[in-house]
Image (cartoon, rainbow, N blue to C red):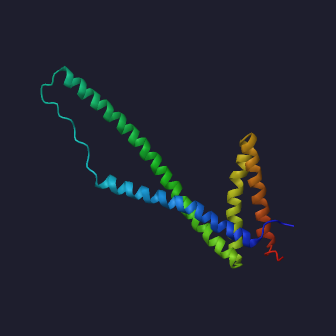
Amino acid sequence: MNPISIPLLATLFTTASALVGIPSITLLLFYLAHQVVKLTGSAAANPNFGTNPDAVLLVLKWMTGAIGALSSLVSSAAQLLFNVLAVVAAAGVVFAIACWFTGRGLGAQAHWARISAGALLTLLLLPSLLLALSLHNIGRLVMLALVGFFVVALHTVWAGYAAQSS
């Protein structure tokens, strides 16, 4: 007897859509706010030390230039990381929408939802298999448990188990 039913899978897909979608949408909103601030902000002013600065002012000018270059480098790296996270968040929103529609379709016993659920479960199964081969100790055990869950869930989708009545 399969411990997973179609209504349970529908609930899991709907829950997964919320767990993935809410943080992804939040990150995308932060990214949008950052881009708006970046576009409306003004550039930092260049320090002006005069035409004939003395030695202390030359040292200060060199220090501000070095700190400015370092902050520019860190800012560029942070912006690259933020861009990558925004792309991942956009993929997370697409995945969350797919999970939500699949969960709603499974709840309504739609045939297309079984196909979508099979595709999404297979999409999740493949990286879990790869990680189960790559990780050691407790990580491998967790990934093997996930692989087992995904295989049983795929069996449920393919076999079409209905809700078990008591």
Residue at the spot x=57%, y=68% of the render? 97
Residue 154 relative to residue 73: left or right: right
To which quarter of the image does residue 124 belong? bottom right
Residue at the spot x=79%, y=68% of the render? 156
Is 14 located above or below residue 82 in the figure?
below
To which quarter of the image does residue 105 belong? bottom right
Q: Residue furthest top?
A: 55
Q: Residue furthest left?
A: 51
- Please tell me how many numbered marks the rendered image carries: 0
Residue at the spot x=53%, y=54% of the render? 88
Which percent across, then down, holds residue 147?
A: 76, 54
Residue at the spot x=87%, y=67% of the render? 1
Which percent across, then down, holds residue 58?
A: 21, 24
Is 71 located above or below residue 6 in the figure?
above
| Quarter placement of the C terminus | bottom right
Which percent across, then down, holds residue 102?
A: 65, 71
* Residue placed most toward the observer, 63 or 124: 63
